[in-house]
Structures are given as C-alpha cells and as structure tokens.
Image (spheres, rainbow, N blue to C red):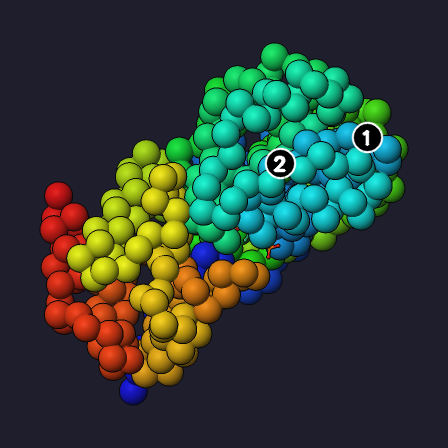
C-alpha cells in the first residue's frame, strides 16, 4: 500500500469536503438553488480578488481567461507590452500573436523578476501601448512579480494592466482594485483547491472602455455577453460547469472561514519552510530574490538529473512534484505548496526528497532538512 501526495502547481489537492459537495446529484442551473450558490460564489470571488467589480466565471482552464482578456480588450493591430519571465509570460506573447496584436516583449532572465522601471521606460517611449501583460507568480520559475509597483506606473498612462494571477491568487498578497489592476485572472486548480475547469476574470472600468472598442473575433469568451447575463439574470450565457461552481462555493467558504490573510500567511510559511530545508540540504534556490508563496524551484545538485529524482519520488514514495521546462528541464525540481496544504505536507515532501537523494548517492544527513522545516513550522 502506498499513499499519494500531490504537490504540483496545478492541479492541486482537493479537500474531501469540496469533493463531497461536487458528488451530490446534479441540479439544473436555471433554478433558485443554483442561483443562490452562484450568488455566493460571485460575492466570495470579489472578496478574494479584493475588487468591487464583478468577477466573471468561465468554463475553461486558466488559459481560457487569458484568451478572454486578449480578445475582449484588444483589437488586431493594437500594441501590447508583454513581460516574458518564463513559460506563462511567453504564453501571453503567443496569445497576442494568435490575435494579431503587435507585441513588445520584455524578456527577463528566468528566475528573476521584471524591473518595474523597464515597464515605465517602454510606456514613456511608446504611447501606442494599450495593454501591459504580466504574471503575478511565474509558476515556471517560482518568481513573484511586484504588481503593486507596476500598477502605480501603468495607472499614470492610457494603458491597462492585465495580470495572470492564476497560481498566485489565494497564495500571494494581491489586491485587484488597490493595486490598479485592470484585468485580474485566476483559475480553479491552484490555490482555490478545485479540479481544473474554471477560470475567472475581473475587469476595471478602464478595461471595460477598451472592451467596448475591441474588434477581435470572439463568441464563447465574449465578456460583454457574460456581463449582460450576470447583471440581468445572475447567470452565465452558457451552461456553467455546475459541479465545479458548487465545489467553488464550498472552497470559498473554507477560505473565508480560515480568513484570507491567514491563508496567505500559511502559504508564506510553507514556502519559507521549504527554503530553509533546502538551505541545510545544500540545494540552491532557483529564484532566491523574489520567492513565491505558491511554488519553490530548487536546483539539482551538480551531476544529478531532476527527472530521475522526480520519478523515484513518485514510484517509490507516492510523492508527485514536477521538474523544469525548456532550458531548465532536468536541472530543477519544483515543489508546490499551494492550496489545500498544511505543515505535514511539507514534512512529507522534504522527507521523501531526502530519502530519494540519499538513494541516488547524494551526501546528506537524513532528517536535516526535515528539522529545518520543523523549526519554521513551529514559529
Ligand atoms: C497554471 C497556470 C496557468 C494556466 O494554465 P491552464 O493549464 O490553462 O490552467 C496560467 N498561468 C500561470 C501562472 C499558471 O500557473
């Protein structure tokens, strides 16, 4: 017998209470029962996004809401500034390209965060820029972006600020309205503790002005349609992912019960525990400057392959983490501490990594990393 532990930055573990809610008999969505649930969900989403605006619920993985941002806010031939500091920043670029948006890329070395002043420079030099695309937590590199500062810079211009907060929302501090974020995006399978299948997007008034002008093709992801349906009927334009919305209602209640700030503090503490453990285990942080509360990438000891470690963790210990992408494939491991996780999830993953590394011939005193993590977790 072997238990399974999921520590990936999406999908994440789903709490049994959420799974049970979703297992109940199907209901129809044009009913008072569903509409009550959906209303609670809308209120809960506003709280977690820290916005007074509506948060639209889309049936897709997170990328669907990214696509919705591009097709609803821009038109072919528009110019956008894209921060590319990893795979998800790169995705913004690809999405813009797919819809004939001219993109100016700010390429940031993997493991580093964008300097907000570079964004200011581009905005001053190029008045054509209509939107700035960024990522709160760049999941591929474990870097958190300084959205608050970027928001202050973009606010002073005609451009809007679009933030992929898919892995960051509910793990990092993030204030949509206070930080002047014009489009904030999240997904269900990260800190919101649900299976994949829902995406969320909140728009500011400044963003809606651009939405009125947008000429990009859209149908399923039309946010104007979503707004009309929500405002006039408290509904979505098409059949919602009913079970997931019901699960979300439960998950949001759990988050409210714990307290949003406590949820963020918990994530921060789990991240710190991993980093302290890594230090004594001789594993270098991939992004030491701006570590994320959601996921921690660690460099492999020299000469050791991340793929071998990841495979061993899964097959022998039932622990699932992931590796790096592109040029850091094989060189880093990424441990998520995101969503439905507490201190003992961290102890398990560190303990398993210690055992697997020793089996691979790495010189390490068993329990050292675990001890360092315990010290943080007891604080
Ligand atoms: C998970 C993730 C996404 C969305 O990916 P999907 O597979 O479409 O859900 C986008 N951006 C970031 C930063 C992510 O972590």
Q: Nearer the viewer, residue 1 or 244?
A: 1
Closer to the chain start, of discs 1 and 2, is: 1
Q: Residue at x 30, y 49 (%)?
A: 271
On the picture, is 370 further left or further right than 190? left
Q: Which mark is residue 106?
A: 2
- Residue 36 pos. (x, y %): 55, 41
Q: Residue at x 22, y 54 (%)?
A: 279
Specify whether residue 254 is in view. yes
Q: Nearer the viewer, residue 363 or 317?
A: 363
Which residue in the structure is indicated by mark 1?
78
On the picture, is 125 further left or further right than 6? right
- Residue 118 pos. (x, y %): 57, 26
The quadrant in which the C terminus is found is top left
- Residue 117 pos. (x, y %): 53, 23
- Residue 85 pos. (x, y %): 55, 44
Give the total number of marks visible in the rendering.
Answer: 2
Occupied quadrant, residue 317? bottom left
Occupied quadrant, residue 197? bottom right
Q: Residue at x 48, y 22 (%)?
A: 149
Element at label 2: strand
The quadrant in which the N terminus is found is bottom left
- Give the label, 1 or 2, closer to the camera: 2
Occupied quadrant, residue 56? top right
Element at label 1: loop
- How packed mark 2 is, by other alpha carbons closer than 10 Å (few <14, some 14-19, many 20 or more), is some
> Is 313 situated above or below 54?
below
Separation (CA) of disc 1 from disc 2: 17 Å
């Amino acid at each position: 017998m072997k238990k399974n532990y999921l520590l990936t930055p999406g999908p994440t573990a789903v709490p049994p209470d959420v799974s049970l809610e979703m297992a109940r008999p199907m209901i129809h969505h044009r009913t008072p029962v569903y509409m009550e649930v959906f209303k609670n969900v809308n209120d809960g989403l506003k709280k977690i996004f820290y916005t007074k605006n509506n948060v639209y619920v889309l049936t897709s993985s997170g990328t669907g809401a990214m696509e919705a941002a591009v097709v609803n806010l821009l038109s072919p031939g528009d110019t956008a500034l894209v921060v590319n500091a990893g795979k998800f920043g790169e995705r913004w670029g690809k999405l813009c390209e797919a819809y004939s948006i001219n993109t100016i890329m700010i390429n940031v070395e993997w493991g580093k965060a964008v300097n907000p002043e570079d964004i200011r420079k581009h905005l001053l030099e190029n008045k054509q820029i209509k939107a700035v695309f960024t990522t709160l937590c760049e999941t591929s590199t474990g870097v958190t972006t300084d959205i608050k500062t970027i928001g202050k810079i973009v606010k002073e211009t005609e451009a809007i600020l679009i933030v992929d907060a898919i892995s960051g929302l509910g793990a990092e501090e993030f204030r949509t309205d206070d930080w002047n974020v014009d489009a904030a995006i999240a997904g269900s399978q990260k800190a919101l503790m649900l299976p994949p299948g829902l995406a969320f997007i909140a728009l500011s008034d400044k963003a809606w002005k651009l939405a009125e002008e947008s000429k990009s093709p859209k149908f399923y992801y039309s946010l104007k349609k979503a707004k009309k349906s929500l405002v006039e009927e408290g509904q979505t334009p098409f059949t919602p992912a009913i079970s997931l919305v019901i699960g979300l209602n439960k998950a949001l209640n759990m988050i409210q019960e714990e307290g949003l700030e406590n949820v963020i503090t918990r994530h921060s503490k789990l991240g710190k525990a991993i980093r302290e453990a890594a230090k004594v285990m001789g594993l270098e942080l991939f992004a030491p400057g701006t570590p994320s509360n959601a996921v921690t990438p660690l460099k492999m000891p020299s000469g050791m392959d991340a793929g071998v470690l990841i495979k061993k963790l899964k097959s022998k210990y039932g622990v699932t983490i992931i590796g790096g992408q592109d040029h850091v494939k094989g060189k880093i491991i990424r441990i998520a501490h995101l969503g439905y996780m507490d201190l003992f999830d961290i102890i398990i993953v560190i303990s398993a990594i210690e055992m697997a590394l020793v089996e691979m011939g790495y010189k390490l005193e068993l329990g050292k990393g675990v001890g360092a993590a315990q010290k943080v977790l007891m604080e």
